Image (cartoon, helix red, strand yellow):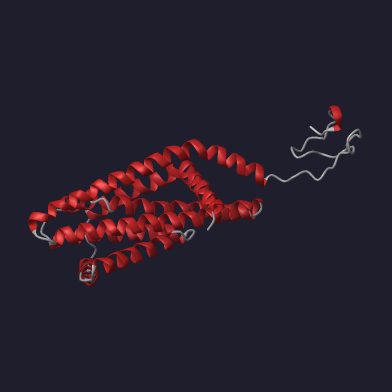
Amino acid sequence: MGSKDLTSILDTLKIIVGKRWLLIAVFFLVEIGMIVFIANSAFLPSELAIYEKQYNSTSTVLNQASAGQVSAIFSNNFRVAIVELVPVLGLTIFGLSLYETARIVEVIAIVKSVGVGVALGTLFFLPSTWLELPAYAIAAAESVYLVYAIFLGFRRGWTMFIREIRFLVVNIILIAGVLIVAAIFEVTEIQFEQGPAQTQAYALLTWIPFVVVFAGVLKFWRSARRDAPAIEEREAEGLAPESNIVVVEGQPPPQGEKGEAGSPASRNEGGATA
């Protein structure tokens, strides 16, 4: 991958961050609201046993070495995010994954004999949560944009859809990167939690690298908000169809012909079209 490809990816990422952050933020808030609401709701009949079994199955992951834990957590989370990217279906999977997360939190509260509020507090106190949830929000937002691009494709041509495919690729790269970092954070948190009681408080140290990551993201977001309009304008100029009219200097343009803007081509000094 050359520097030109990296520049293109960076420009695309700036458009995504600079122009789509509001929809991503909406999905992020929906995630938090749904998890809190569902975790405080009563289980359906026989539902508790299903999620208890699912929670107990995580022991196979926890018994692995750190590298295996990172790989297993990332693989599971990335698989969910990829499915969430699918138009229409993705939003359904997005809702189901939030439902399962909330129910697992409720099971943890029951197993550990603590209140749901304590279990939720623990979930939202972990830095890994603040990486995983935005990654899923990005996937859900891209699913919406894909639906919109397909809709426009049928009505106005497929240029918009092809452009969205590039955004999709960059979003996949972004989601993968975020989820890898989140998995490393989560395994670190698990290692501290499984250690001696006097070392469990060291899990708070994971907030130090998280703050560094967050500061970098915030700086990039501000840069994207500034640069995105100019990048889109430059791309729009590149996608604009070129005029097929060739005007010979000193000769008037053909009568009835129209320029790019749709208005009749007019003669200027020197014979150049307006």
- Image quadrant occupied by the C terminus: top right
On the image, the x and y values in percent for residue 67 come to: 28, 67
Above or below: residue 160 compared with residue 56: above
Q: Nearer the viewer, residue 62 or 90?
A: 62
Q: Residue at x 33, y 63 (%)?
A: 74
Q: Can the viewer see residue 121 in this picture?
A: no
* x and y, in percent, of residue 130 in the image: 30, 49
**Left or right for 180, reference 260:** left
Q: Residue furthest front?
A: 3
Q: Position of residue 202 (x, y in %)?
A: 15, 52
Residue in the image at 49% along x and 48% along y: 10
Quadrant of the rendered image containing residue 39? bottom left
Examine the image and state in which quarter residue 261 appears.
Answer: top right
Residue 228: image x %, image y %?
A: 52, 40
Question: How many labels sit on residues?
Answer: 0
In front here: 20 or 232? 232
Report the side of 147 relative to 197 (left or right): right
Residue at 42% across, 52% down: 138
Residue 158 appears in view: yes
The residue closer to the viewer here, 101 or 274, is 274
Residue in view at x 38 percent, y 53 percent: 135
